[in-house]
Image (cartoon, rainbow, N blue to C red):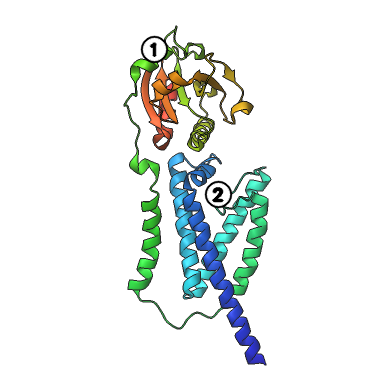
Amino acid sequence: MTSFRSKAAQVAAVAVRMALGVLFVVSAVAKLLSIDEFEIYLFSYDVLSLRLSMLAARLVIVAEALVGIGLLANVWNRFVNVCALLMVVVFTVFLCLSALAGRTDNCHCMGSIIEMNPTQSIVKNAVLLVLLLVAAGARPWRWKPRWYLWLPAILIPTVTVFVVSAPDYWLFGPQEEIYNREELDKAIAPEGELAPAGLANGKHVVAFLSPGCPYCHMADEKLTHIEMRNRLNKEAFVCFIPMKDSTMIPMSVDSTAFTHPCYRLTNMTYALITYGQRPMVFLIEDGAVKATCHYRNIDEHQITLFLNDDEK
């Protein structure tokens, strides 16, 4: 009878361990599928720079995938158990701080597949901790993988994450190329359609966004946190969205769901300036366009240097 109970406990511990391994891997894949949202979520805490947020997001995914693989492999259990427990504890502390700070948005523990706020995720992690303690009772398999087996098991997930979704700054740098300069100059001029925004004087970060474009909303979030983290002049950020109405009217934040107030612009002018590409971000000084960006190459250092250059 004792032997039966012991075997049943072992089977249960191994089963829980396998289930947890699958959960960790699925969680890593879910984060990778929504990597843009995840890196902006990390950036939104205004602790890490935009580049470090991109790197940290991928390292979290790699760590989670490796812990999941370690649980599934059921070898070197003591080391894997400690890594898994530490990871869940660190995540839980982070979530507790987020909850205390009043954050109620998706914490991206399961990417965008299952949205959970910090409080819900804390409960989920409490259950995970209990299950990890149960899984810790599983005896490791007798086989010991050689280096030519465990080394690829570490390298392949790591390389895959950075190949499938390399950080934007690895592929896209700041650019000086100006799209359709004549149309933009014409719109900025005193008699132009953008004249009421006052772009002919001073330095401005001008974003052309669209309410129905998810990347436009993420670009707006990037710009907002770049502004907040570096204490930049909020008045320097100006947004335009396309509308059928021919009159350029300032719109409230509530009416657009963007964090910056927007001006509405005729569809034709919007298309001529942006070539139909959205989002587009221009750095403009005294009516002259100094640089242009798309979503992938919005550069925190470039924008900060541009707006703070006069202070040096």
Callout 2: SS:
loop
Please determine whether, in this image, residue 296 is positioned above or below residue 239.
below
Q: Quadrant of the N terminus?
A: bottom right
In this view, the residue in front, 56 or 288, is 288
Mark drawn on residue 242: none
Q: According to the image, label 2 marks what residue?
A: 112
Q: Residue at x 44, y 6 (%)?
A: 191
In this view, the residue in front, 273 or 138, is 273
One can see residue 270 in this view: yes
Q: According to the image, label 1 marks what residue?
A: 186
The amino acid at mark 2 is: Ser
Report which quarter residue 300 is drawn in: top left
Callout 1: SS:
helix
| Residue situated furthest front in the rendering | 244
Place of residue 174 in the rendered image (x, y in percent of width and height, measured from the top left): 35, 32
In this view, the residue in front, 160 or 100, is 160
Q: Residue at x 53, y 81 (%)?
A: 139
Report which quarter residue 305 is drawn in: top left
Q: Is residue 243 left or right of residue 129?
A: left
Looking at the rendered structure, the number of numbered marks drawn on it comes to: 2
Q: Residue at x 57, y 18 (%)?
A: 250
Q: Quadrant of the C terminus?
A: top left
Q: Is residue 98 left or right of residue 278?
A: right
Counting residues from the start of the chain, the first of labels 1 and 2 encountered is 2
Place of residue 272 in the rendered image (x, y in percent of width and height, measured from the top left): 39, 21
The amino acid at mark 1 is: Lys
Question: Callout 1: few (<14), some (14-19), or many (20+) C-alpha neighbours within 10 Å?
Answer: some
Please determine whether, in this image, residue 200 is positioned above or below residue 41.
above
Place of residue 254 in the rendered image (x, y in percent of width and height, measured from the top left): 63, 28
Place of residue 222 in the rendered image (x, y in percent of width and height, measured from the top left): 49, 35
User: For the residues marked 1 and 2, what is the alpha-carbon distance in whole angstroms?
Assistant: 42 Å
Please determine whether, in this image, residue 90 is positioned above or below residue 52.
below
